């Protein structure tokens, strides 16, 4: 009896095994057809991402590229760990994608790219990499300050801590938007200063937003920017003051109309005041003026100079004057500055110097005419208005 049972078990096992083996060719054919069918549904498009997955110390410009063969790119997403997206464009009929801007330094990026073949089947690729950490960096100090209200002549001016040899890349990394919209263009003064302005003075009420996307931009070989900042400022009321060096007057204009006329003294012969449009770049309630600081060594050293407003880097001011006697409105007696009657320290706010100081803001324009000197150099202060728009944009 046990032998019979064992025989039956062997037959059962054989039957099971034989059943699988007997249907093997059938099952194998079915499996093969399924595999062929699945293979036929896979995209033939191939997506390639450079740099390779896991790469480190990647250059911030020129290294990131995405391409597709046997298909066309339909989607490329490049993001930081914070979810900040990098803009880019698919070009060459879908064969390639490149970023529209440089990448930030010391940052990890992830890339997700999708391509479709001629039958619409998708292929995707994912990758990540980390950009280089610069050994040498630069920053820019700028004016006006974030949140400020400034006059109609105020450019956005940025001075860099290192000389820039790749100016186009740096300028591209700075974008300016205005409300209402106006064309704003940049101009380089030397290799360390870049100013932006519209063709004509700003319109009152204009809101300006400047995006400094300098982090990672290579300003010169091996030297990278490290700023990522947004600066906003507003254009205030329109005030342009006209100084006539021959008549010894200043007409303070608001919206093109005379607001107040003040008596002044300008530069005496040999020390004439510059002609041209000059922008107030700094206001000092009280200061000290020493000839040594502007190349007039020993000629003057005046304490408690009131209500001083800088017009040039070389030392031209419009300021209160308490030592000028009867010069105001009568003759020119200064060393190149525009002087207005005032008191020492400026305690009397009713006099011309104090009044003009209290009614002026950084960015207001002071235009001098009929002086015997040349027109101020556009680079001497924030005075690019003395350059034609054609030259500014060339």
Image: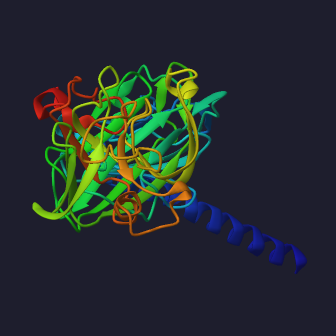
As displayed, is residue 150 above or below residue 154? below
Q: Position of residue 56 (x, y in %)?
A: 63, 34
Q: Nearer the viewer, residue 369 or 225?
A: 369
Q: Determine whether, in the image, residue 86 is placed left or right of residue 3.
A: left
Q: Report the quarter where the N terminus lies.
A: bottom right
For image coordinates 50% across by 49% down, the residue present is: 228
Instruction: Kindly give the residue lying farthest to the bottom in the view shown.
Output: 1
For image coordinates 40% across by 30% down, the residue present is: 335
Q: Determine whether, in the image, residue 389 is placed left or right of residue 115.
A: left
Q: Position of residue 222 (x, y in %)?
A: 56, 21
Question: Does residue 116 show up?
Answer: no
Q: Nearer the viewer, residue 362 or 68?
A: 362
Q: Report the quarter where the C terminus lies.
A: top left
For image coordinates 56% across by 65% down, the residue present is: 19
For image coordinates 44% across by 35% down, the residue present is: 64
Image quadrant where residue 106 sits: top right
Q: Nearer the viewer, residue 321 or 393?
A: 321
Image quadrant where residue 223 sits: top right
Q: Position of residue 226 (x, y in %)?
A: 56, 41
Name the colour scheme: rainbow
Q: Determine whether, in the image, residue 394 is placed left or right of residue 144.
A: left
Q: Nearer the viewer, residue 94 or 298?
A: 298
Q: Position of residue 53 (x, y in %)?
A: 56, 39
As displayed, is residue 222 above or below residue 351? above
As displayed, is residue 367 above or below residue 370? below
Instruction: Kindly give the residue lying farthest to the front in the view shown.
Output: 326
How many tags in the picture? 0
Question: Does residue 214 show up?
Answer: yes
């Amino acid at each position: 009896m046990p032998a019979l049972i064992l025989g039956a078990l062997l037959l059962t096992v054989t039957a099971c095994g034989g059943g699988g083996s007997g249907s093997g060719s059938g099952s194998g054919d079915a499996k093969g057809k399924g595999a062929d069918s699945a293979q036929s549904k896979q995209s033939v498009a191939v997506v390639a991402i450079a740099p390779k997955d896991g790469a480190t110390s990647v250059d911030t410009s020129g290294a990131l590229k995405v391409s597709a063969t046997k298909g066309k790119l339909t989607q490329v997403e490049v993001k930081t760990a914070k979810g900040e997206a990098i803009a880019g464009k698919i070009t060459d009929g879908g064969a390639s994608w490149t970023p529209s801007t440089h990448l930030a330094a010391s940052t990890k990026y992830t890339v997700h790219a999708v391509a479709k073949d001629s039958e619409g089947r998708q292929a995707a690729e994912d990758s990540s990499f980390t950009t280089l950490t610069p050994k040498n960096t630069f920053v820019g100090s700028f004016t006006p300050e974030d949140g400020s209200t400034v006059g109609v002549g105020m450019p956005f001016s940025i001075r860099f801590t290192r000389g820039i040899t790749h100016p186009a890349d740096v300028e591209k990394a700075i974008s300016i938007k205005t409300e209402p919209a106006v064309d704003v263009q940049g101009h380089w003064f030397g290799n360390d200063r870049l100013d932006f302005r519209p063709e004509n003075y700003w319109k009152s009420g204009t809101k300006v937003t400047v995006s400094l996307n300098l982090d990672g931009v290579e300003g010169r070989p091996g030297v990278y920017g490290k700023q990522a900042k947004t600066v906003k400022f507003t254009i205030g009321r329109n005030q342009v003051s006209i100084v006539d060096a021959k008549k010894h007057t200043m007409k303070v204009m608001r919206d093109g109309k005379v607001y107040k006329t003040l008596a002044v003294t300008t530069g005496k012969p040999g020390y004439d005041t510059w002609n041209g449009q000059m922008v107030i770049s700094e206001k000092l309630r009280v200061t000290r003026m020493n000839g040594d600081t502007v190349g007039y060594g020993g000629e003057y050293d005046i304490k408690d100079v009131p209500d001083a407003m800088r017009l040039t880097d070389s030392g031209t001011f419009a300021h209160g004057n308490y030592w000028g006697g009867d010069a105001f409105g009568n003759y020119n007696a200064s060393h190149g500055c525009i002087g207005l009657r005032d008191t020492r320290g400026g305690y009397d706010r009713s006099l011309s110097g104090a009044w003009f100081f209290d009614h002026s803001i950084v960015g207001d324009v002071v235009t001098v005419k009929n002086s015997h000197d040349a027109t101020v150099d556009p680079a001497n202060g924030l005075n690019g208005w003395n350059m034609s728009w054609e030259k500014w944009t060339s």
